[in-house]
Image: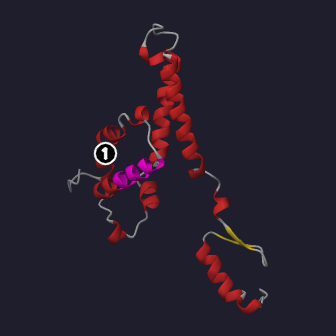
Amino acid sequence: MAHRQWPLHKRLRLWRAYVLPATLYSLTSSGVTRKGVDLLKVELVRQLRAVARSPRHITRESDKDLLSRVHIPHVLLLLHDRQLRVVESNRKQQGALAPEDARIEPPIMAYEEGLLRALQDMLAPAIAPQASLHHTRVQCQKEFPAAASLRQHRAVVHRRGQVYEQA
């Protein structure tokens, strides 16, 4: 997939068609922990960097920016969507399949729905509003996206208890 003649979109199509399904195969039925999701993300991003020829030490591109640029959602979203499709498919087939079919037995359906709920619970903090990540300076009511920028503001504007008025 690192063939120099193929454009990026073709290399990504191959990666999506072969590598991603092979990697995610059976994870929705066996379940995955948060640590497993993190390990899986590391491996998939490593593969994507090779396919996109975007080594971190040269491009300084973050994982989030890389995933955004190549239009690949977070691994947790991929797993959630796959498990949601499995649960919806089984619900649709409930009336069409014989009652003794293993796919629609109540314990299996409950297990698959439990996996979906577990993925939704892991997904909730990942898609929480970004407002919780903002840091606010109480004295001047300014918001900062990172703790480092809040510290810098505090050091420059509020040092030794002084408050400098903005013009």
Q: Is residue 164 left or right of residue 68?
A: right
Asked whether, in this view, residue 59 is left or right of residue 127, the answer is left
* Residue displayed at 33% across by 58% down: 49
Please, is residue 2 above or below residue 156 in the view? above
* Percent position of residue 16, x then y: 34, 42
**Is 150 in front, or is 11?**
150
| Residue 119, horizontal then vertical, whole percent | 52, 40
Q: What quarter of the picture does the C terminus occupy?
A: bottom right
| Residue type at tag 1 | Trp
Q: Residue at x 63, y 58 (%)?
A: 130
Callout 1 crowding tier (Cα within 10 Å): few <14, some 14–19, many ≥20:
some
Image height of 80 relative to 61, above or below: above
* 162 with respect to 46 (left or right): right
Residue 72 in view, yes or no: no
Q: Nearer the viewer, residue 149 or 58?
A: 149
Q: Residue 73 in the image: x percent, y percent? A: 46, 48
Judging by the rendered image, the residue that carries numbered circle 1 is: 15
Task: Give the magenta-colored segment's residue range.
Answer: 34-45
Name of the residue lying farthest toward the front: 107
Q: Residue at x 24, y 51 (%)?
A: 6
Give the structural element (helix, strand or loop) at label 1. Answer: helix
Predominant SS of the magenta segment: helix
Q: Is residue 57 magenta?
A: no
The residue under the point 78% across, 78% down is 140
Query: Left or right: 81 with respect to 13?
Result: right
Q: Nearer the viewer, residue 81 or 36?
A: 36
From the top left corner, tell me how far across and down residue 138 is, in percent: 77, 75
